[in-house]
Amino acid sequence: MSGKDDLNVELPPEITKPGSAKEISIGCLAGFCSGYATKKLSKKAGVALGAGFIGIQALNHTGLVTVHWDVLEKKLVKSLDQDNDGKLTQKDLNIVSARYLHLLTQDLPFAGGFAASFALGMKYG
């Protein structure tokens, strides 16, 4: 048995056709950058929402404003509930995540590489 014959593996045509490596690398780069940016923007949005909540709660505490949290909660749940079950659950987050990823990969020939690299960008962002 020679080592040369053992390495003769036939790859699928999707990988070996001309331009495939370029599409995969572009998809990986675009996915990683998009994931990284999404994570960074999500953190900034979280800080802004948290600071806004602290400010509103401070004004509510001092009596300068009155916040009806129960009304606000009902409106937020109604607008964010994706599966229309009347509750915010992990399923709603999964639906939003899937829609966001679909939006980013729509009509892309390199969606597979994009999705995997997007997850890496989210992890390291």
Image (tube, grey):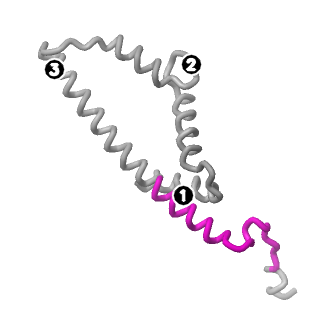
Q: Position of residue 102 (x, y in %)?
A: 59, 44
Q: Nearer the viewer, residue 109 or 125?
A: 109
Q: Amino acid at mark 3?
A: Leu
Residue at left 74%, top 71%? 17
| Residue marked by disc 3 | 59
Please tell me which of labels 2 and 1 falls first in the chain.
2
Q: Pointer 1: residues within 10 angstroms few (<14), some, or many (20+)?
A: many
- In the picture, the quarter occupied by the C terminus is bottom left
Residue 93: % across, % down? 52, 32
Picture quadrant where residue 28 is located: bottom right
Looking at the image, do the residues carrying marks 1 and 3 touch, with CB atoms under 8 Å apart? no
* Crowd rating for badge 2 (residues with CA inside 10 Å; few <14, some 14–19, many 20+): few
Q: Earlier in the sequence, mark 3 or mark 2?
A: 3
Q: Which mark is residue 117?
A: 1
Query: To which residue does mark 2 refer?
Result: 84
Span highlighted in magenta in the image: 8-34
Q: Amino acid at mark 1?
A: Ser
Locate residue 114, reporting x and y percent: 57, 56
**Real-space Cα distance between discs 2 and 1?**
31 Å
